[in-house]
Amino acid sequence: MSHPCLIGLDWGTSALRAMLIDGHGQVIEEQFRRWGVMHLPDGGFRSAYDEITSVWRTEWPDLPCLAAGMVGSRQGWIETPYCDAPATIEMLATRLTSVPDIGVRIVPGVALRGTRPDVIRGEETQIFGSLDQGKDRCIVLPGSHSKWVTMKSGGITDFHTFMTGEIFAALRDHTILGIAASPETSTEAFDRGVLAARAASGGIAPLLFSARSLVLDGQLDPSAALDYLSGLLIGDELHVARLNAKPLLIGDADLCRRYQRAMNLYEIEADIATPGASAKGLWRIARAAGLIPVER
Amino acid sequence: MSHPCLIGLDWGTSALRAMLIDGHGQVIEEQFRRWGVMHLPDGGFRSAYDEITSVWRTEWPDLPCLAAGMVGSRQGWIETPYCDAPATIEMLATRLTSVPDIGVRIVPGVALRGTRPDVIRGEETQIFGSLDQGKDRCIVLPGSHSKWVTMKSGGITDFHTFMTGEIFAALRDHTILGIAASPETSTEAFDRGVLAARAASGGIAPLLFSARSLVLDGQLDPSAALDYLSGLLIGDELHVARLNAKPLLIGDADLCRRYQRAMNLYEIEADIATPGASAKGLWRIARAAGLIPVER
């Protein structure tokens, strides 16, 4: 077994993933709990941290611990101020915030200021974990809040948030479009939604009701309506982003494939990042911060 | 007191309004209950109808009764098939569906077929009730589902549904944008949202997160975020609809004024319909159907 040199925490809104990481940034062991920042167990952050890492810390009491994600937000364990873009690994590494008396350090998110402010928190770590797949490219991290990030010379220079996943869930669960929802998957309906969004000139707001009216008119099977809606929303995201180079997709495998499929309908090829981006990113930032030795 | 000649029911998804209507289409008395098609009392449609009209029917047992709205949908009292557009009062009047053994007649909705199918149900009656304010114009009925309707020579020829109100409610109640919601109203933030939507070139999907990030960056007061979001959504509706003539707004007074304000920011003047459109429409359709005598 390779020797552990870091405990990494990927601690988001809905879940906590703890990783025992070796000297090459690879995951040795992993623990997952639904203890997101908004769903903590009794005892809060401290109890969650103690419980998920106790076995490792008993065996290796001196391991450093680095966390990324919403754990550093205002609603998190300790607020970790954003680092302004453009941001590099080195900049993040000099701005870690420590949880007092515990020694857990937290990676800052990145903020864009100005007339179109935006923020990322957690994604910066995944991005730096995928650095060997591109230092100058567009990176897309699909999810509740999809992030489109521009990397230049290994630094995060610009980004844009689309609430696609959260909007999809709200429309599915809380509007008429969720009626007759079905767990079946129709790639045909998904493609149809993507292409309808691609052909739309003024955004998809005027198209959303078609996910209902096409069903009422017998032109869309009720069981396929949600895939059509998903296609509309993801297609619109692609439409607006006006992608013109081969992007790198980072995130949940199924969702990345869904985006890859939609991009193909826009005649754009996309790469999907190799798994383990969070662990690799935490390891790289920990090295840059001097928390673990750099192998020579 | 003027003599009643019709009981009219405006029976939608969330509420039931019963109106005692005179020979000029004016409301003599009115009853309102939160007995929408999806929120019926025990005993269902029949009980709701009996209870809300019993006093009137005891006094005037021969009054005809005409209903409009979702009461005629598949989930309604009795399904009343849509009338295809273009649709006139006379066409609707010949296609009323009667509830068996009860004598209540229901006005059909209007359907648009083809590649962009769409439907209205209930709005057709309000539109025909406002016919004296324009037989050739664009009519906008804001609401959960806003309807943009084109009238030509007194007939409904085209229309388009925007789910603006329902999307707003889903985003407010079920996404991060509803955080720090406040009952205060900020017309300034509303205007800012409208103007941001007006300036957007590809729909507002990329702008939605700004209702959050502007707050995080201190550029928008949390209490004003929902008005900004409302401005974005209504502004986008106006952007897409590319209005170029003076429209007529029909519906809830506050909402009509909100749309009128947004239209002003697009340099478009709008009229707001005189109240009582539903009653007037039911009365006109009842006359065209021969349910009540036409005065000469």
Image: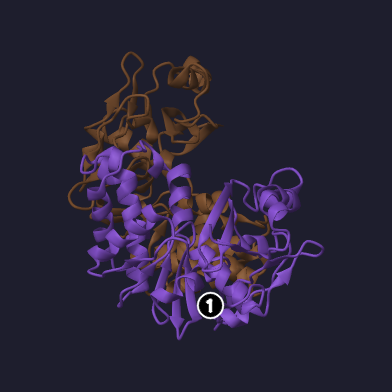
Chain colours: A purple, B brown
| In the rendered image, the vertical position of residue B271 relative to residue B3, given as above or below | below
Name the spot of residue B146 as percent of width and height, x first. Answer: 41, 52
From the viewer's side, name the closer residue of B247 and B135: B247
Direction bottom: furthest residue: A153
Side of B129 where A93 appears, left or right? right
Q: Amino acid at mark 1?
A: Arg
Direction right: furthest residue: A101
- The quadrant where residue B126 appears: top left
Name the spot of residue B151 as percent of width and height, x first. Answer: 27, 55
| In the rendered image, the vertical position of residue A234 relative to residue A125, given as above or below | above
Q: Residue at x 31, y 44 (%)?
A: A225
From the viewer's side, name the closer residue of B74 and B1: B74
Rendered-image quadrant of the C terminus of chain A = bottom right
Give the SS element for disc 1.
loop
Name the spot of residue B258 as percent of width and height, x first. Answer: 53, 61
Side of A249 where A1 appears, left or right? right
| In the rendered image, the vertical position of residue B278 relative to residue A98, given as above or below | above
From the viewer's side, name the closer residue of B13 and B176: B176
Mark 1 residue crowding within 10 angstroms, few (<14) / some (14–19) / many (20+): few
Q: Residue at x 40, y 65 (%)?
A: B238
From the viewer's side, name the closer residue of B45 and A181: A181
What's the chain of the residue with tag 1?
A
Q: Residue at x 21, y 47 (%)?
A: B85
| In the rendered image, the vertical position of residue A184 relative to residue B155, given as above or below | above
The count of marks equals 1
Residue that mark 1 sits on: A116
- The quadrant where residue B190 appears: bottom right
Whether residue B36 is visible = yes
